[in-house]
Image (cartoon, helix red, strand yellow):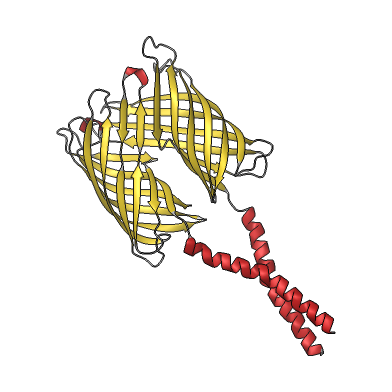
Amino acid sequence: MRKVTSTLVAAVALVALPHLALAQRARSAASGPKNEIGIDLGAAYSHIGSGCAADCGGFGFGTPVDIRWGFLSHGQLSFEPRFALNYSSLFPGHELSFNPDLNVIYRMKKSTARRGMYLTGGLGLAIANISNGGPSTSATQLSLNAGVGKRIPMESNAWRIEGFLRYNLENSGKGIPSRFDIGARLGMSFWR
Amino acid sequence: MRKLFGGMVMAAVALSLPATAIAQRRAAAPMGGAKHEIGVDLSAAYVSPNTTGVDGGIAIITPVDVRFGIVPRSGKIMWEPRFSFNFNTVGGQTRYALTPQLNLLYANSTGGHRRGMFFAGGAGLVLADPSGTASGTAVKLEAGVGWRKPYGSGAWRYEVGFQWVSSNDNLAPFLLADYIAIGGRIGISLWH
């Protein structure tokens, strides 16, 4: 009888072990994703400010806008770098356009990192460097942006829609006027 | 004693049920699997334009375009539409560039469309009005070989190959047509 009892206890323990291990893995998976990666379609109305006399407004849209690479956090604040790069050394010279940006994302009360509304604000640079064979010319423009968005879960990913305002400061030294954009971006977010 | 045995058997069954269910779900996941492979890339290539007086050079771009692969339930062949789109009317002139493309991927490894080596080939169009005054269309053909390397729930994707774009007088000055490019793409793929 003792043998039967101990065999049964051992069987119960064996059956329970994988379940406990799976539970542990599930818990570690829940804290799993580190990054939110996304791409968007963007549309905006732009208005050129300083130094513009005629045809100062316009509309543009396109995809992919830039690459979003967010870092998830346990708190309500998280950081999201965004960037786009275009470089070509063709012709006698070259052209470089690099637009890095760092946004802070604040989740609203009932939201999580995967769903719900959020507020965002960020600081970016628009760096351009052009050469036509001679000395190169560089220009940098500082940009500020703010927006409100929402993540809508779709299977293991999420749709993300965001309305934004962006202001590019004037660079008077290089003759680049200020610019104001108001628009929206719609894209998809993935976690890994 | 019979009560004790009965209780232990019930406990064993109760403990084993969730583990069995999870095991079934894990088995079904790769079978049902993802329907789409979505990704963005950084591209670096040596570009040789056919335009007289223009030398070849390096071009680096990110994000290049949006990949939206349609993952088959079985088989080694996968279709992958790609596109980029940019449209703006800023400054009183309308400029746009639309580059739809369809690639075919042949999985050359046991990892299927999730990991390992693949061959790719495709054709596309460049529909653009880069100057705001004259539009044009060019045909694009490309072929290459690539690898997917799992990374979290996604995968890094490396690809090397070449691309040929037919001539068009309105697009060539903007490097949208009439060139051969040899290079590679590095990007991230995510499934949903």
Q: Position of residue A100 (x, y in %)?
A: 47, 34
Q: Is residue A35 or residue A90 the one in the foreground?
A: A35
Q: Is residue B189 or residue B13 the one in the foreground?
A: B13
Farthest-out residue, left:
B52
Relative to A76, is B152 above or below?
below
Residue occupying image coordinates x 30% and y 39%: B99
Q: Position of residue A149 (x, y in %)?
A: 57, 33
In which quadrant of the rendered image does the N terminus of chain A lie?
bottom right
Residue A49: image quadrant is top left
Relative to A76, is A122 above or below?
above
Q: Is residue B65 or residue B135 the one in the foreground?
A: B135
Relative to B130, is B123 above or below?
below
Farthest-out residue, top:
A53
Q: Is residue B46 left or right of residue A123?
A: left
Q: How many marks?
A: 0
Residue A117: image quadrant is top right
Q: Position of residue A147 (x, y in %)?
A: 56, 29
Relative to B65, is A62 above or below?
above
Residue occupying image coordinates x 17% and y 31%: B169
Residue B109: image quadrant is bottom left
Q: Is residue B179 left or right of residue A119?
A: left
Q: Is residue B60 left or right of residue A122?
A: left
Q: Position of residue B136 (x, y in %)?
A: 22, 32
Q: Is residue A117 or residue A175 the one in the foreground?
A: A117
